[in-house]
Image: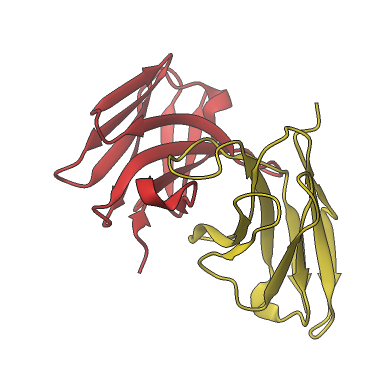
Amino acid sequence: NAGVTQTPKFQVLKTGQSMTLQCAQDMNHNSMYWYRQDPGMGLRLIYYSASEGTTDKGEVPNGYNVSRLNKREFSLRLESAAPSQTSVYFCASSEIAGGIAGELFFGEGSRLTVL
Amino acid sequence: DQQVKQNSPSLSVQEGRISILNCDYTNSMFDYFLWYKKYPAEGPTFLISISSIKDKNEDGRFTVFLNKSAKHLSLHIVPSQPGDSAVYFCAASANNAGNMLTFGGGTRLMVKP
């Protein structure tokens, strides 16, 4: 019963390097999300995909790109990493695509450090 | 400016006593509120929610209270158990914003045996 799976769990990058965080869910959910968690800031939405084929910016999208590869997979790419992107990243999914808020299912997180 | 605030970064409670975690919000369009619980090295998990048409929702040891006029909600855990030690996030959303949850900064609860 995997739920939401993120890879890698840990990554250290140098400033300017690029990388992609992968996320897959096996719950047949329509919507998927990428959040970042920083101390005292809670979780902030980077990008989301309400349904397959659509993506939209969240609260803090600068420096990131996303791809909804199919219904299961939603990737987050850092094209040129900066120290300000040091954070813990969470992927999440939900059944309800819009209208009424519902429960989100989160992955275990990916800890990224940019030197 | 944070629309959802949890002003207490940490809370320590004795096992068996009540834990009260507080959350304030500023956006009057928020109409659905959720609490998530997070253990170290794990993702947040949904705990309990409340719609703005209610003022109380109860699920076992967990009760969420909503005071719309004060834009305040609280989570009560009775009795508290050591396994409740975790970080608790308050989240809110507006009906026309789908699942775009806005999270508070979190409160770390420590329940001492």
A7 w.r.t. A86: above or below: above
Front position in the image: B107 or A54? A54
On the image, the x and y values in percent for residue B42 come to 69, 41
**Frontmost residue, A96 versus A19:** A96
Q: In which quarter of the image is residue A89?
A: bottom right
Asked whether residue B94 appears in the rendered view, the answer is no
Q: Residue at x 78, y 79 (%)?
A: A79
Q: Residue furthest bottom?
A: A16
Q: Quadrant of the N terminus of chain A?
A: top right
The hue of chain B in the figure is: red
Q: In the figure, is residue B30 to the left or right of B43?
A: left
- The yellow one among the chains is A
Q: Is residue A110 left or right of residue B26?
A: right
Residue A79 visible: yes
- Using the image, determine if residue A69 lies above or below residue A93: below
Residue at left 61%, top 77%?
Answer: A62
The answer to whether B84 appears left or right of B90 in the picture is right
At 69% across and 79% down in the image, what residue appears? Answer: A83
The residue positioned farthest toward the top in the image shown: B60
Numbered-mark total: 0
Q: Which is more toward the observer, B26 or B80?
A: B26
Give how far across and how far down residue A10 sits, in percent: 83, 58
Name the quarter where the C terminus of chain A is drawn.
bottom right
* Residue furthest front in the image: A53
Determine the image quadrant of residue B61: top left
Measured as percent of width and height from the top left, residue A15 is found at: 79, 84
